Image (cartoon, rainbow, N blue to C red):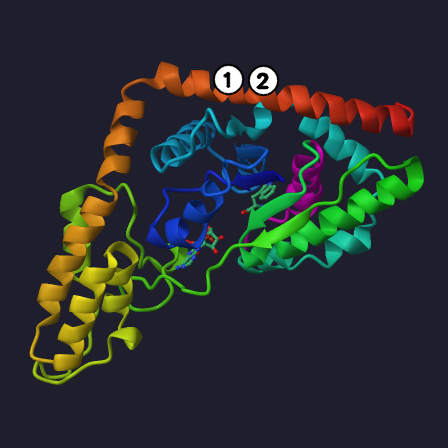
C-alpha cells in the first residue's frame, strides 16, 4: 500500500485533530510507502504572512515528529521542497474541466466564510491531485471533508490517462474515523473555529486551567449519571486505560461525586498521555538542525519519486 497524506500548517493541533486524524494516519506509517507532507502551498491560499507560514510549517513538522511520526519509516517533507508538484499541477490543470472544480464544496464554503476569492482557492483541488498522483499513491487517509477532493483527483487522473495513456495510479480515500467526535470545552465538537479547543502542546498550567473551566451541567452531586452521554467522561476516556475508565464509569452510575474531581483526573491523564510527546517536541525545538535535516532527507526522497512520475507525464503529453 502506498499511503500519502498532507496536512495544512494552519495552526497548532488540538485534541480533536489528534484523535480524529493525526493518530490514525501516523498508524499507517509502516506501509510499503508512506509519505506525509506539510501542505504549505495550499496554506498560501489563506496565510498572507511569510514569516508565519515558514514558522507554522516547521511547527507542524515538529508536532508530527513529536507525536510519533518516524522519519526512518515514513517520508516527511514540505510540499514546496518538491517543485515537480507545481509543474505537474499545470499539466493537470490544462485538462481539468472548470465544472469539476465549480462543484467543489470546500471552495464554496471558504468563499462563503468571506475568504478573498483568489484563483488558488479555486484550483486548490488540482494542486492536491498533483500531490497525490506524483507519488503513485494508492491510499489517501483524510477526514470526510476531503473525500470530494480525492474523487476530483481520480477524475483528473482518469481524464489524463484517457488522453495520454496509463500514466497515473488512481488513488482511493481512506476516511478517518471521526465518528467519536472529540468534544470541546463547551461540550460541542472541538474545533479551532469555535474557540473551544485544547492544544496538545499547550503549557501545562493554562491547559489545566482550561480543563477546570470545561462546562458541566448543574444536576445535583448525588444524582446518578450516564457516563456515555457526558462530554467530560468522553474526554477522560480518550486518555485513560480500561481500568480507570470502568472505575470512572461506575462512579458516574453511583452518583455522589463532583465534576471538579473528574476534571482533576482528566487533567492528570491528559498531561501524562502527551508527556513523552511534549518532551520530544522540546528536544526537537532545541535542535533545529536535526529538524531541517529530516525535512531535507524527506524532500530528497520525495523528489526522486515525483521526478520519475512527472517525467512519465511529460513524455506522455509531449512537453
Ligand atoms: P478544526 O475544526 O479545528 O478547524 P480541521 O478541520 O482542521 O479542525 O480538522 C483537521 C482534521 O482533524 C480533520 O480530519 C478532522 O476530521 C479532525 N478533527 C478536527 N476536530 C475534530 C474533533 N473534534 N473530533 C474528531 N476529529 C476532529
Ligand atoms: N487539503 C488537505 C486539507 O486541507 C491537505 C492536503 C493537501 C492533502 N494536499 C493533500 C491531503 C493531498 C491529502 C492528500 O486537509
Whether residue 118 is in magenta: the answer is yes
Check contact, mark 1 vs mark 2: CB within 8 A: yes
Whether residue 299 is in magenta: the answer is no
Which quadrant of the picture is home to ligand 2?
A: top right
Q: Residue placed at 15% from the left, 62% from the top? A: 263
* Quadrant (top left, top right, bottom left, bottom right) of the C terminus: top right
Per the rendering, the mark at residue 182 is none
Q: Secondary structure at mark 1?
A: helix
Q: Residue placed at 7% from the left, 79% from the top? A: 256
Regarding residue 119, the answer to whether it shows in the image is no
- Image coords of residue 313 (percent x, y): 82, 29
Which residue is the site of mark 1? 296
- Image coords of residue 204 (percent x, y): 17, 44
Extent of the magenta region: 114-134
Q: Quadrant of residue 307?
A: top right
Q: Secondary structure at mark 2?
A: helix
Regarding residue 58, the answer to whether it shows in the image is yes
Between the residue at mark 1 and the residue at mark 2, the CA separation in whole angstroms equals: 6 Å
Which residue is the site of mark 2? 300
Q: Say how many tags the image has.
A: 2
Height in image: 66 above or below 124? Answer: above
Height in image: 138 above or below 239? Answer: above
Amino acid at each position: 500500500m502506498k499511503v500519502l497524506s498532507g496536512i495544512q500548517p494552519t495552526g497548532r493541533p488540538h485534541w480533536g485533530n489528534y484523535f480524529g486524524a493525526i493518530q490514525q494516519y501516523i498508524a499507517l506509517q509502516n506501509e510499503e510507502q508512506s509519505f506525509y507532507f506539510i501542505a504549505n502551498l495550499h496554506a498560501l491560499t489563506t496565510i498572507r504572512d511569510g514569516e508565519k507560514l515558514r514558522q507554522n510549517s516547521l511547527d507542524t513538522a515538529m508536532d508530527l515528529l513529536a507525536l510519533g511520526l518516524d522519519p526512518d519509516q515514513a517520508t516527511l517533507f514540505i510540499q514546496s521542497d518538491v517543485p515537480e508538484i507545481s509543474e505537474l499541477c499545470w499539466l493537470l490543470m490544462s485538462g481539468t474541466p472548470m465544472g469539476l472544480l465549480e462543484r467543489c464544496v470546500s471552495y464554496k464554503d471558504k468563499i462563503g466564510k468571506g475568504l478573498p476569492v483568489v484563483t488558488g482557492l479555486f484550483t486548490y483541488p488540482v494542486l492536491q491531485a498533483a500531490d497525490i498522483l506524483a507519488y503513485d499513491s494508492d491510499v489517501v487517509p483524510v477526514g470526510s471533508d476531503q473525500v470530494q477532493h480525492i474523487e476530483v483527483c481520480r477524475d483528473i487522473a482518469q481524464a489524463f490517462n484517457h488522453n495520454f495513456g496509463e500514466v497515473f495510479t488512481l488513488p482511493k480515500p481512506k476516511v478517518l474515523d471521526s465518528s467519536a467526535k472529540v468534544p470541546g470545552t463547551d461540550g460541542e465538537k472541538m474545533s479551532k473555529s469555535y474557540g473551544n479547543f485544547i492544544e496538545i502542546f499547550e503549557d501545562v498550567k493554562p491547559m489545566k486551567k482550561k480543563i477546570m473551566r470545561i462546562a458541566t451541567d448543574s444536576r445535583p452531586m448525588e444524582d446518578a449519571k450516564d457516563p456515555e452521554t457526558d462530554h467530560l467522561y468522553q474526554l477522560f476516556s480518550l486518555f485513560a486505560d480500561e481500568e480507570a475508565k470502568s472505575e470512572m464509569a461506575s462512579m458516574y452510575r453511583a452518583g455522589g461525586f463532583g465534576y471538579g474531581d473528574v476534571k482533576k483526573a482528566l487533567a492528570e491523564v491528559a498531561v501524562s498521555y502527551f508527556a513523552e510527546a511534549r518532551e520530544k517536541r522540546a528536544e526537537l525545538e532545541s535542535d533545529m538542525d536535526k529538524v531541517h535535516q529530516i525535512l531535507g532527507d524527506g524532500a530528497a526522497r520525495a523528489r526522486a519519486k515525483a521526478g520519475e512520475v512527472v517525467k512519465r507525464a511529460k513524455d506522455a503529453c509531449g512537453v
